[in-house]
Image (spheres, rainbow, N blue to C red):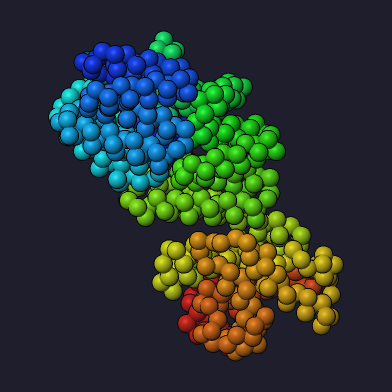
Amino acid sequence: MEKPPALNGGASLQQTSLARPSLGRNTSELLQQGLRHDREGSVSLASQLYNAALQSAESNADARHTAEALRRLGVLHHRSGDLESARALCRRSFEVANLAQDCVLAAEAMNAIGGFALESGEIDQAETLYEEALELGGGNEEIRSHVEPNLGVIANIQGDLSGALAHYESALHASRRTGDDRATAIAYHNLGMVSSDLKHWPEADRYFQESHTLAEQMNDTHLRALCLLNRTEVYLATHRFNEARRSAESALVIFDELNSPLDKADAYRMLGTVLRETGNPALAEARLRTALQLAVSTGAVLSEAEAARELALLFQGTGRNQEALTQLNSAYRLFGRLRASVDLVDVASKVENLEGTYLSVVRDWGQSIESADGYTHGHCERVASYAVALAGLLGMDAGTQTAIRLGAYLHDVGKVRVPHEILNKAGPLTKDEFDIIKLHPEWGVELLAGIDFPWDIKPIIRSHHEKYDSTGYPDRLAGDAIPVSAQIICVVDVYDALTTTRSYREAMARDRALEVMEGSRHWWHPDIYEAFRRIVA
């Protein structure tokens, strides 16, 4: 799913308000002129006009104009990445409107504040503010046309696509009734977003085109750029790669002219994705790193998480597994922060997809390690399958089973430092050679030292050759000092080693392998060993 303005990278558009023609004449003209320049991308001139309107309103004790000017300045500061000033200005707008008992303007200010909360990943707070704004508006169609799209964004984030669709359609009807072309354009844009989420690409393309046409007619530069950015996903999905690149690049140029770092982060991320998918990894990495830096600088948590995920996919595709895992960990933590703040269905699905990517990256890495030894092809996959089955039989939870699967894929990662001639030696190893082999658990942990996994897999890697009777390595641990997960990997690792052909001997039959292991059952906890026997049987 593409995100609402500050979520994963171009998205359902949040609505702000238009000028109310009933406001005082001179100040109203300043506000309207400011709004026109704002939409055209002349941010500096728009800011001057809004400030002039504010001074005029305050000098005339005109609370309604004051509230309007404050809110518009707040939205302008927000788009420039100055979130603190944006929040302060819109809070002042709400207070002034509230004192003037102007519920519509108070609702508009609350709606804007909700947008800032959404950009910062405070999803539950944003939803509360939007609902309060709708209630404060008291059925006003203008307020409905501005708030319903934002509630649709929340529903979209939560994975409630039918709810999002209903909100966007409600916004479209309200905007048509009030003759608000910009709100209509935003409704079309958001309908394009939810159609993309549903993978209804022709409908999404049509909605974005409708929105883009209205944005051009109104000379609304920002909305036009958002349509270009989010239409890029449609082009990618339908393999129109040249159009995808042109669309993302055009959006980036506009956002740069608008000095909108939040939107630039999303545009850089989308452009990086296009470049990655069209076989330009070096440039894709540069663009995705820029997206990440911009997202961090603006505090856009979801944008940062999405950029990290896309960068991880790039690294996975180019075999840079350690870097891929570092970025995946970053994305996992960021999504976790959002998930902890509120029960988000869509974030939960993103985390689930992220776990699938983790397994894919780790599996690829494990297989690349095996490629150095022609006799161990498929070893990590088999160890993982046995180990997860054993963990399930022992009643371990899903999180622990995931850790064990990942640990199984990477348990021999340290062997990349073992000289090739030792790893593939046909005859028995000398003591010195075996001493080198015994270093691979420690080397594995060293290789992963810079990766802060969400699961506790490093003890598995370090201790998967420890024995219950203290005869293992590298730390000669004994009994329950050995992590249970490491004992599980150890027992299935030994079984797979015995039942597959190695450089120094032929594979054993299952029964012979079990007979050999029975003589060494004191290497493992009795419960683990017995459960292993049941699994193999």
How many marks can you see? 0
Q: 468 above or below 168?
A: below
The picture places residue 330, in percent across and down from the top left corner, at 53, 53
Q: 144 above or below 287?
A: above
Asked whether residue 223 appears in the rendered view, the answer is: no
The answer to which image quadrant residue 382 occupies is: bottom right
Nearer the observer, 309 or 174: 174
The answer to which image quadrant residue 70 occupies is: top left
The answer to which image quadrant residue 104 occupies is: top left
Residue at screen point 43% across, 54% down: 336
The picture places residue 193, in percent across and down from the top left corner, at 40, 29
Nearer the observer, 117 or 476: 117
The picture places residue 269, in percent across and down from the top left corner, at 55, 36
Nearer the observer, 25 or 16: 25
The picture places residue 391, in percent across and down from the top left corner, at 47, 70
Q: In this view, does 367 lie to the left or right of 203?
A: right
Asked whether residue 308 appears in the rendered view, the answer is: yes
Q: 44 above or below 481?
A: above
Which residue, as the protein is rendered here, is positioned at the far front? 59
Residue at screen point 71% across, 60% down: 370
Q: Is residue 15 left or right of residue 251?
A: left
Q: 343 above or below 179?
A: below
Residue at screen point 47% across, 51% down: 334
Q: Is residue 66 left or right of residue 334?
A: left
Residue at screen point 51% across, 77% down: 484
| Quarter of the rendering occupied by the N terminus | top left
